[in-house]
Image: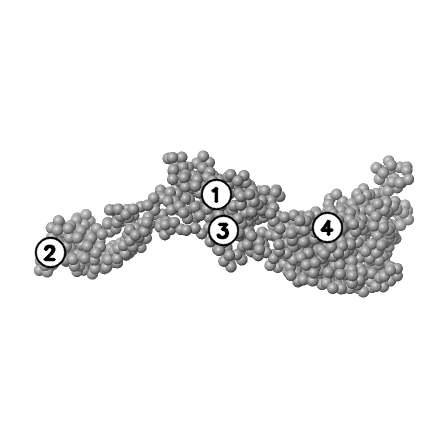
């Protein structure tokens, strides 16, 4: 034990003499060097410069943060130039900085992040908002503000909230602009919206460059314009947009947070500048109104005195995040030292090989504690002037939120908030965080907005482009049923029911629609509607009108309007007249109904005979006499002419119920027979689509119709059985010829065509029920706003009666004599009378049971020892008693004497 303590003492003394003092694992230096890359003259840079300097002063004056260690900051002005930013970063690295705040823009950040990765120096930027900087490619880049990924999510939810589907993206063509718009496109796609036109601008765009871009934008359809650029170009865009009349009613301008930065920094702006921004919606990174924020805002004026020769400037959100960035870094450095971190640098072996030359790249050193400091930065959990500061696993700040601002008059109003927690809301994020997250559409809410043109009416969001181009609308050519669509020979004019519906609906729209009708098809055969719809997806047509059925396959390609014709597939077949003949009186009932009714008459006679024969002399006598009496009684009840009277109550009840049944049957038979003899009856062996499926006969269909694909793909009918037909004359000939003479057994077609076909051809008829519903509509590209407006117009036509008037004009024909006839012999079925027969049967059964019980009580048993007679003998005697002893039952003297001597009633106790 003494030796162990001696060894510990030797080691302890060695440390004292070798270092002069006992040292900890980490020694805090008195000064820590960091750098900052700014653009002093930019809107963000000059505010950030003041905020960073104030933060450095506050940190160094607070001994609780770094325990006496001071932060020494070196700033460089990149003059908003990417190349200078890169050079200055390299200069910082020569001076062994442990971290760098900046750069200002995303373009420079992409390059500098590569250097930070190599030298392991954390790069903290409060203004480089490009979402791609958060990727695994840049582990040492740390964004200390909100990513544009969240800002674009907010923009997408605003677009979806107001029901718009297409937007125009106007952006600066660099990493910041391009990657931001890519994020916007992804977020819009999640809402089934899209960017219809991208309008990039050069980084240093001139007025001429912006003018060219705006002219192209004005020629597009969408009126929802998202501006994602820098403050200088953004102001110029809105100024020129007003000059070109693009800030009027109908337009929507949504600016990312560059506009709110201008408003916060330079407020109050000159009236002519504010005029350029009227009605614009912009976003601003949200910072809760905390005590720390109020304290910092209250001293902002003192901080900016003398900082600008021109005028004072306000505090924008980037300034708040820049201030918090310094504090975040200070807390991370403190944690770095607490974990034993040491500030030391070592040469980069790959750079030392490049020694020589004026660039002095071999002087760049690797920060040995870079990984530990980066880890400390990402683990910081503090409260700053922007609210709680904490990183997610994706290196984003928690609780991203934006204010949604509407520029009005000399200032702006807040119309709501967006949070990644609950979407759009008029409640502040702090309130929302106290409730469960709710992103349902009913919970999304914003206050009213005053749009460009000083209107509160929600803009439609699109207009027809002013490029002189007319909509190319495809119209299928028809060789049959030209009442629906037809082209006037030798002209570009179309007419017909479908054309009138389209033009009348178009006249109800609150705007003009320039269009040109273009025929589709060869003019010899009915064209394929599915192919016409497909051409809309390729851009060959902007829309398609005509007799186009709305089917599942077609709705996957385009959007349809509200149906203006309710239709579906039906079966048409030849019918023949059923003339009255000598046996027509049998037709009201089905064979089964006749059989059951006849049996019922016989049964009711047998039941009444059985109930009455013991007491009613009318039902007694020889077997032949009893049989004839039963038959006469049974069938005479049909005419209520039964001459045989009943004496017992059970038989009277049975007869009463049966007469009620006969009354119903007679009334139904009379009505059905009258209908058969007075109305023309048509009959066909085809009873509907099931008959066709179960047969092998050929089936006709209209060429170009979707009926073919439905019969083959959905019903499994072989293609060899299908016969294409073009015209109504083809229908008639094929049906008349029939399968035996090269025709068809039936035609499957849309009800709208069939009704027109049958209006003058009474020898054919619809058989069975409509077996698929498929209305007609006008086809437009996916998410086309014109489809919605046209649907509304079609509903108005239906409500005001114009749709019916157009129908009567084109499709009303003189009805053939077949109208009012039936194509089926509607025979009375047994199932229609099941209840009556069941009631009567139950009554008969009940009467028989009561009668048997009565007889059993009167039946005398054998006197003698118990068990002497078998069950079979008892049953035989009982049946003999029922059959032979009705006379004795009527003679009291005989019945009494014989019963007293040898029998006792089986209902009493047996005497042995």
Discs 2/4, front: 4
What's the distance in space between the residues labelled 1 and 2, CA to CA? Answer: 87 Å
Does dot 4 land on a helix, a strand or a loop? helix
Does dot 1 land on a helix, a strand or a loop? loop
Does dot 3 land on a helix, a strand or a loop? loop
Q: How many marks?
A: 4
Q: Which residue is mark 2?
A: 887
- In the visual, does 452 lie left or right of 37? left
- In the visual, does 67 lie left or right of 461? right
Badge 4 crowding class, 10 Å Cα cut-off, few under 14, some 14 to 19, many 20 or more, is few
What's the distance in space between the residues labelled 3 and 2, CA to CA? Answer: 80 Å
Task: Return the disc, 3 or 2, that comes first in the chain's sequence.
Answer: 3
Q: Position of residue 250 (x, y in %)?
A: 67, 57
What's the distance in space between the residues labelled 3 and 4, CA to CA? Answer: 42 Å
Discs 1/3, front: 1
Discs 1/2, front: 1
Residue nearer the viewer, 890 or 655: 655
What's the distance in space between the residues labelled 2 and 4, CA to CA? Answer: 119 Å
Tag shown at residue 783: none
Q: Which residue is mark 3?
A: 565
- In the visual, does 192 lie left or right of 695? right
Discs 1/4, front: 1
Q: Residue at x 47, y 45 (%)?
A: 481
Badge 2 crowding class, 10 Å Cα cut-off, few under 14, some 14 to 19, many 20 or more, is few
Residue nearer the viewer, 613 or 796: 796
Task: Return the disc, 2 or 4, that comes first in the chain's sequence.
Answer: 4
């Amino acid at each position: 034990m003494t030796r162990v303590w001696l060894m510990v003492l030797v080691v302890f003394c060695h440390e004292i003499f070798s270092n002069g003092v006992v040292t900890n694992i980490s020694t805090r230096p008195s000064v820590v060097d960091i750098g900052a890359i700014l653009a002093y003259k930019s809107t963000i840079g000059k505010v950030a410069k003041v905020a960073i300097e104030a933060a450095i002063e506050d940190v160094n004056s607070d001994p609780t943060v770094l325990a006496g260690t001071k932060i020494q900051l070196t700033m460089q002005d990149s003059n908003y130039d990417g190349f200078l930013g890169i050079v200055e970063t390299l200069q910082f690295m020569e001076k062994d900085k442990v971290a760098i705040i900046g750069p200002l823009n995303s373009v420079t950040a992409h390059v500098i992040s590569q250097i930070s990765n190599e030298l392991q120096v954390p790069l903290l930027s409060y203004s480089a908002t490009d979402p791609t900087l958060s990727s695994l490619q840049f582990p040492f880049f740390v964004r200390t503000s909100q990513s544009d990924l969240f800002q674009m999510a907010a923009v997408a939810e605003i677009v979806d909230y107001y029901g718009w589907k297409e937007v125009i993206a106007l952006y600066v063509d660099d990493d910041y602009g391009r990657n931001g718009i890519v994020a916007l496109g992804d977020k819009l796609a999640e809402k089934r919206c899209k960017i219809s036109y991208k309008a990039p601008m050069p980084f240093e765009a001139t007025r001429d460059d912006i003018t060219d871009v705006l002219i192209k934008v004005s020629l597009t359809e969408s009126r929802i314009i998202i501006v994602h650029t820098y403050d200088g170009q953004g102001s110029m865009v809105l100024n020129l947009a007003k000059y070109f009349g693009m800030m009027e009613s109908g337009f929507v301008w949504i600016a990312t947070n560059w506009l709110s930065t201008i408003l916060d920094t330079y407020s109050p702006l000159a009236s002519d500048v504010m005029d350029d921004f009227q009605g614009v919606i912009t976003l601003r990174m949200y910072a809760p109104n905390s005590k720390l924020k109020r304290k910092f805002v209250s001293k902002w004026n003192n901080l900016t005195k003398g900082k600008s020769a021109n005028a004072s400037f306000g505090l924008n959100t980037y300034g708040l995040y820049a201030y918090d960035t310094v504090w975040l870094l200070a807390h991370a450095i403190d944690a770095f030292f607490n974990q034993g971190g040491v500030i030391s640098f070592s040469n980069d072996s790959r750079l030392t090989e490049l020694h020589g030359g004026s660039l002095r790249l071999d002087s760049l050193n690797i920060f040995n504690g870079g990984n530990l400091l980066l880890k400390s930065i990402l683990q910081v959990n503090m409260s700053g002037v922007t609210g709680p500061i904490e990183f997610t696993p994706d290196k984003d700040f928690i609780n991203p939120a934006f204010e949604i601002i509407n520029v009005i008059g000399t200032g702006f109003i807040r119309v709501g908030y967006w949070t990644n927690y609950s979407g759009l809301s008029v409640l502040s994020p702090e309130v929302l965080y106290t409730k469960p997250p709710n992103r349902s559409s009913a919970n999304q809410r914003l206050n009213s907005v005053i749009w460009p043109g000083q209107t509160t009416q929600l803009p439609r969001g699109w207009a027809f482009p002013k490029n002189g181009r007319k909509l190319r609308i495809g119209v299928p050519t028809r060789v049959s049923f030209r009442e629906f669509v037809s082209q006037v020979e030798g002209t570009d004019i179309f007419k017909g029911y479908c054309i009138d519906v389209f033009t009348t609906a178009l006249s109800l729209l609150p705007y003009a629609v320039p269009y040109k009708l273009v025929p589709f098809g060869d003019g010899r055969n009915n064209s394929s509607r599915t192919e016409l719809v497909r051409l809309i997806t390729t851009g060959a047509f902007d829309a398609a009108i005509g007799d186009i059925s709305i089917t599942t396959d077609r709705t996957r390609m385009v959007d349809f309007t509200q149906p203006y014709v309710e239709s579906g597939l039906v079966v048409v077949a030849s019918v023949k007249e059923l003339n009255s003949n000598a046996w027509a009186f049998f037709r009201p009932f089905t064979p089964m109904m006749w059989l059951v009714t006849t049996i019922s008459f016989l049964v009711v006679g047998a039941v009444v005979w059985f109930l009455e024969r013991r007491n009613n002399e009318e039902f007694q006598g020889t077997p032949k006499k009893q049989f004839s009496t039963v038959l006469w009684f049974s069938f005479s009840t049909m005419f209520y002419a039964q001459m045989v009277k009943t004496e017992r109550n059970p038989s009277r009840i049975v007869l009463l119920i049966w007469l009620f049944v006969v009354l119903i049957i007679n009334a139904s038979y009379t009505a059905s027979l009258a209908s058969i003899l007075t109305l023309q009856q048509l009959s066909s062996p085809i009873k509907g689509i099931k008959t066709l499926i179960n047969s092998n006969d050929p089936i006709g269909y209209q060429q170009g119709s979707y009926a073919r694909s439905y019969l083959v793909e959905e019903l499994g009918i072989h293609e060899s059985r299908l016969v294409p037909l073009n015209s109504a004359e083809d229908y008639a000939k094929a049906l008349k010829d029939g399968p035996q003479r090269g025709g068809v057994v039936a035609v499957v077609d849309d009800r709208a065509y069939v009704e027109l076909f049958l209006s003058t051809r009474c020898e054919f008829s619809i058989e069975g029920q409509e077996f698929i519903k498929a209305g007609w509509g006008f086809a437009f590209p996916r998410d086309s706003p014109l489809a919605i407006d046209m649907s509304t117009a079609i509903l108005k036509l239906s409500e005001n009666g114009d749709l019916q008037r157009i129908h009567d004009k084109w499709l009303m024909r003189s009805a053939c004599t077949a109208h009012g006839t039936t194509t089926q012999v509607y025979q009375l079925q047994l199932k229609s009378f099941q209840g009556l027969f069941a009631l009567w049967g139950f009554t008969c059964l009940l009467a028989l049971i009561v009668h048997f019980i009565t007889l059993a009580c009167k039946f005398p048993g054998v006197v003698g020892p118990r068990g002497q007679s078998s069950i079979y003998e008892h049953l035989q005697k009982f049946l003999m008693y029922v059959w032979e002893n009705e006379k004795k039952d009527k003679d009291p003297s005989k019945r009494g004497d014989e019963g007293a001597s040898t029998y006792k009633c089986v209902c009493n106790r047996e005497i042995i």
